[in-house]
Image (spheres, rainbow, N blue to C red):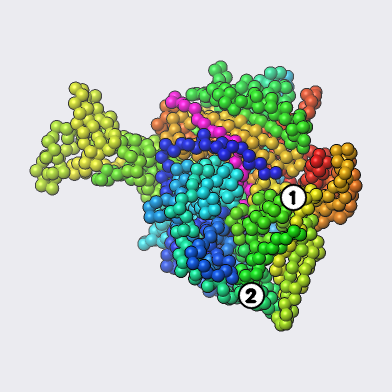
Amino acid sequence: MMLAEWLRKEAGLSGTKIVCAEGDCGACTVLRAFPRPGAAFVAGAAFEYEAMNSCIATVAQMDGAHIVTVEGMQRGNELSPAQHAMRVCHASQCGYCTPGFVMALSGMLEKHAQADERMAMNYLTGNLCRCTGYAPIIQAALTVRATEQHSVALRYSDMNAVAESITATEQSMRVSHDGVELFAPATLREAVTFAALHPGFRVIGAATDLGVQINKGKPMPAALLSLHLVPELYATKVSRAGATFGARVTLAEVRRVSEDVAPEFAQFLNLFASPQIKNVATLVGNIANASPIGDTLPFLLIAGGTVHVAGRPGGKGPIRKRSIAMTELYLGYKQLALEPGEIITHVSFQRTPSREVLRLCKVSQRKDLDISAVSGAFAVTLGTGRRGKSAPCVTSARIAYGGVAATPVRMPDAEQALCGELTTERIESVAHLIAGSIAPISDVRGSGAYRRVTAAYIFRRFGNEVLRG
Amino acid sequence: MAEHTSTPTRLAAIITDQGSVPHDSSTTHVTGKSEYIDDRPMLKGELHCGLVYSPYARARVRRLETAPALAIPGVVCAVTAADVAHNVWGTIFQDQPIIAASEVNFVGEVVAVLGAETKEALAKGLAAVVVEWEKLPAIRSVAEAVAAKSFIGSERTIATGDAAAGLARSPHRIAGTLEIGGADHFYLESQAAVVYPREDGQLEVHSSTQHPTETQHVVAEACGVRFSDVVCIAKRLGGAFGGKESQAAPIAAYAALVAKQTGRAARLVLSKDDDMIITGKRNPFRIEYQCGFDVDGRIIAMDAMLHADGGAYADLSTAIMERAMLHCDNAYFIPNMRVRGQVCRTNFHPHTAFRGFGGPKGVALIESVIEDIARVVGRDALDVRILNCYGPGQDMTPYGQRVEDNHLPELFATLTERCAYRARRAEIAAWNGDRARNPDGHPRGLSLTAVKFGISFTTRFLNQGNALVNLHRDGTVQVSTGAVEMGQGVNTRIAAIVAEQFGLPTESVRMMPTSTEKNANTSPTAASAGTDINGAAALQACETIRGRLSALAIRLRSIPQESWAGKTAALGTMPEITVGSEVSPRGTDEQRVEFSDGVVTVTDRSGSVFSVGFAALVREAYLNRISVSEYAHYRIPDLGFDKLTGKGKAFLYFTQGVAASEVELDRHTGEVKVRRVDILMDMGRPVNHALDMGQVMGGFVQGMGWVTTEHLVYDDNGKLLSHSPSTYKIPNVQDTPRVFNADLIFNHGNTVNVRGSKASGEPPLLLSLSVWTAVRDAIMSARNHSKTENVHLVPLAIPATAERVLRGLSPESFAIWDTQEASAVH
């Protein structure tokens, strides 16, 4: 059962709405605090609340989490700042999306006292409204100010609740319902053992895709493995060479870390999904989901991405770990080069060298929170010494695309063709090579021809940008 | 690529309207306490309903077995065509089965309804129903329907002058075909109904419907009970936009059939996917046209043939076509005109009302034609618009109604000035040619379009409303009307009108849920007319009550207070006061009565004043057995449109406006960025300024989605593929125009409508066509670098998706690949 359904029907809190049941509209937004497993209880510790979509979050995985819904925002008869702003700015018409917007804004106010326009828009990307045209909602977001007495963290961080939460995350958890078993181990050893003993198991991460499949009535695997209680999978390591993220590190954190390690990737993640999704979804989840249009994948393909996997054949003996380069990971449509029983524990990628020009690009019907028709990742290193005099010289190039084949792909021929003196003619011929060497499908997001044409165009744009310096 | 760099205060100017009363549900909306259908607590034994529907556009039902579903524990009931008492419905033509029996005509057509105790049991039950389909050939486009002569209703014509002769003598002529796609309403609350069986065969229906009366009737007929046995209640809707005008009725009927069969409460709440697959959309149109004009761009004649995709059943499509035909002139005088319209029967979901109701199709045609005229004669499109705009000497519509209280010339002039149209036009031309500032060659476009939207249902009998006003003895008021609240604020407006009548604060007026037991034989809340007809009825009821209270107040003036009924009624020592209808709401010539600030004052000619508290006066009225309740009926006067001749007064008045939109196209991807929008409208004298602005900006952005990103894609089986927000892209917060200004002009001259206001629901949506014409302007600028003899008039379908825009900009890039992939989905 999903959290939104549970809130509405079991807890009787019908303020949280369900509209799309796929995490695209934000009407089900709630705030969640979840202590990091393995964290020790410290007196005075407070919950940290973040917005999430409750319609695609399983109730089972909320064990130990603290949830605040729209019903929890008022203090007596006094509206919270977000509620008050939405009301006086006339930001609510039919009212169905309103609780979701209130909670998205409340999530923003937990982190920022006030917002500028760009921040406001980013925090509201995950919420759809069909009545207002958004202008009054933006106005509400710009005028609202956080107050101490309405801070959710201060109001709800009851010490007993925090301690109870932490205790709950220390033990493995097993839930069975209607022929489906969900296991959330507290250690990696238990995780790989379960994986080995349950052929056909699936890892359930933040369920931002699996939850959608469940809601839409797709058959569920009999065994689900949730890694959310394994402390070591929350680790982030940054070095001079690059960054490594555990399987439970959220995209929100990846984005923060990437601001230093791979600024273009951080920038790109602003367009990727909504805050509600990024607060729970993981980079490893995007990789493991193996969609040909997974937005992070072209980047990982050109940034030396590597996944680290673990398995325990037969469920006995030591844990076996190995690494697989991203370029070797995808065998076919949604098919990974993993042995049965192996799970991805970490992913790493290289720091973007200062001499490298790296650009990420997606083509979609709507700019934000839309699945790409085509996405591209380009990186070139330019030869030194001849600057300004003549055309720049490409000494190495990496090119990857999503949405043009059954898997995200690198394009070695195009990379090779790009090396050498960079001229308009060369850009043109590589663009043509790219368009001709892919065979994309036609679907709801665009025709095959459109994908070819835009694949070539976005490369051309990159090439011209490099050419202009 | 993200560019959100405009100043943080860009919106401040337009939404500082904190003086307007907020929406009457605003507090419960923001606290999550507003109750919608599925928020109603489940009763003991209540059943969840689910639908079994066709996966094929057209098929014969060879076998339908519900027994395997009923064998599943928890599945309680299965309803099929045989269980429906009167299995045909339709708002205009009764041509649609409620539950299909032997043949289905669209993907999503329902063949069975299940009722189950849990959602899990329901899902298993739905999967267990056995249907054997025999796929039949289907009609999947307007072109196929025209070829097969598969029509709904007959061809209609509206004509004036002599179009053929006019075209023949025109110095310039253009001809073309315009393809206009549909759009999903994407109300956030999907279709939903709960039905409670009540004693003695009665049914209490709670439905997310814009038309409680029709829902009541369809439920009664489906269940084989009398109209008087069904009460339909619509408290509020989580959005509707036309999608719940007709199509809410069968949804309620499905739940009612389960409730009737089982005697248990039954609830049907569609998932977003099912809702989008099953319910109809804005009608797609294909328009073929010819237009003749002189060297200045003055229109001489136009001839247009409109074909609408009606889907599988008639629904409201013929009325939608009529409104499309009545809006082909829009703001412009066309002396010789012939517009023909024909609705086609295809194998898609039955298309239906959607904000604008056909009007946007007619307006799209003429606004796009004007852009072409401007290109041909080498003038700015705005000048061509002003040249052709309705005004003195050119004020007769093709259907023979004069354009009165016309503010179009003023609107054009004011907005041109305010948005610096001329300067920006020059700046855009400079930008488009400046490779230093615009190295990638992203073209910009600008367009200023108009709307003149006719207010009234074109079906005369729908132009009536009724209202019930009950005063209570503490001086508060309850008002019930046929209007349905769906976010537009109709209740807030009517409450304001009533409060103003009695001189009360708006908090003293409570709007009650719309219910057919209080307001029967109502019209749908549609055609932007909710406040117009229901507010006018409420006003009339208030005036009648005020007349009685005024008469009473005048009488009380001459009676010492200790003799008033409040002191004496229980004893019966004083004679009762009786009043008739002899006193007007404002008193008499001798005794002027005013209701303000909770006090009723009677002023005589000498200026001497008597006053009594409003609540005390109501109590006195009750104790004197004077009614403090009133029911009133209102009909819009003087309408006379003859559907057979296509002539007459179709509308009570017009809501008018103009908008200028500036866009930038991504040369590499075709993505559209709306840089700036300026809107100016005439809403008469608004009852609530903020609510009107909400309609203006919300309607505009909704229309923007229709003309840009909202793309309905169907597979070869006629099944909608873009049936959820992951594939169907309505505007999100980042799509709001970078600069977005909206304003209203002051117009106190609209005396024909309630309180001098004007309807605001639909007209702003039509202004979003300026985004589409601006996109086309940008494409045509990119394609017509120099002013050559041969002007490229690049056609652009609606919606102008990124792919279509890129195809418009660079047709040559697509040519080689298209030939390789003849089956590409466009």
Residue B49 in picture, x, y percent from top left: 52, 62
Secondary structure, mark 2, is loop
Question: In the image, is residue B74 above or below residue B748?
Answer: below
- The image shows residue B756 at horizontal and vertical percentages of 42, 29
Q: Is residue B290 left or right of residue B641?
A: right
Horizontal side, residue B415 vs residue B229: left or right: right
Marks 2 and 1 on same chain = yes
Q: Position of residue A107 (x, y in %)?
A: 53, 54
Whether residue B737 is in magenta: the answer is yes
Question: Foreground residue, A66 or A437?
Answer: A66
Residue B728 inside the magenta-drawn segment: yes
In the figure, residue B362 lies in which quadrant? top right
Secondary structure under badge 1? strand
Q: Is residue B101 visible?
A: no
Whole-number angstrom distance, CA of label 2 to CA of label 1:
36 Å
Mark 1 belongs to chain: A
Q: Which residue is mark 2?
A: A187
Q: Nearer the viewer, residue B162 or B720?
A: B720
Residue at 72% of width from left, 25% of height from top?
A: B375
* Residue occupying image coordinates x 42% and y 37%: B20
User: Hey, which residue is sitting farthest top in the picture?
Assistant: B393
Residue, disc 1: A360
Q: State which quarter of the image contains the C terminus of chain A.
A: top right
Task: Return the residue found at the far left.
Answer: B573
Q: Say which of A11 and A148 sits in front.
A: A148
Q: Residue furthest bottom?
A: A316
Q: Earlier in the sequence, mark 2 or mark 1?
A: 2
User: In which quadrant of the rendered view does residue B394 lie?
Assistant: top right
